[in-house]
């Protein structure tokens, strides 16, 4: 079973079904057990706060991911929930940044949000970049 929790404020319209379907397709091909991930669409002010708090960067960014299987102390192993659901973590996307990037790339905003969500999912799955 694949569970995708989705949260957005009403003034950030997006195609939830399209975004969830894209994430479910990737998860279905890579994870062979019950899995859960959350997606939040937020504004630049909140994204800047998160970026500063967790990355010490006082600026906004397009997407952040927060893995739940990452222990704060590397010496402490993560303890799995007894329900055997793999909770990957949270993907947070800045709606204003998605609009800006979609405009620059001449693409639809929902397509850009899907791209950002998949990028965040890759991080949660352990696929990183420089």
Image (cartoon, rainbow, N blue to C red):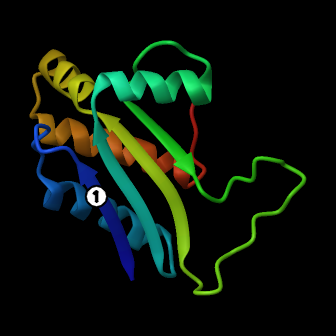
Whether residue 64 sits left or right of residue 94 in the image: it is right
Residue at 54% across / 52% down in the picture?
Answer: 124
Residue 19: x and y in percent read 22, 54
Q: Residue 76: which quarter of the image? A: bottom right
Which residue, as the protein is rendered here, is positioned at the far right? 75
How many dots with numbers?
1
* Front position in the image: 27 or 13: 13
Residue at 60% across / 25% down in the picture?
Answer: 55
Whether residue 65 sits left or right of residue 104 in the image: it is right
Whether residue 32 sits left or right of residue 106 in the image: it is right
Which residue, as the protein is rendered here, is positioned at the far bottom? 83
Q: Is residue 115 visible in the rendered structure shown here? A: yes
Q: Is residue 80 above or below residue 40?
A: below
Residue at 76% across / 47% down in the picture?
Answer: 72
Q: Is residue 64 above or below residue 15?
A: above
Residue neighbourhood size for the residue with mark 1, other residues' Cα within 10 Å, grouped as few (<14), some (14–19), many (≥20): some
Q: Residue 28: which quarter of the image? A: bottom left
Residue 33: x and y in percent read 51, 81
Q: Quadrant of the C terminus?
A: top right
């Amino acid at each position: 079973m694949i569970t995708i929790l989705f949260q957005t404020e009403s003034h950030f319209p997006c195609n939830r079904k399209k975004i969830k379907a894209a994430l479910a397709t990737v998860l279905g091909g890579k994870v062979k057990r019950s899995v859960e991930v959350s997606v939040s669409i937020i504004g630049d002010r909140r994204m800047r706060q998160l970026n500063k708090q967790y990355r010490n960067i006082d600026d906004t960014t397009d997407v952040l991911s927060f893995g739940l299987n990452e222990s704060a102390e590397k010496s402490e192993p993560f303890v799995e929930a007894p329900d055997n659901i793999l909770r990957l973590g949270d993907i947070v996307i800045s709606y204003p940044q998605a609009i800006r990037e979609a405009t620059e790339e001449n693409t639809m905003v929902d397509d850009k949000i899907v791209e950002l969500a998949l990028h965040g999912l890759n991080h949660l799955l352990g696929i990183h970049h420089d």
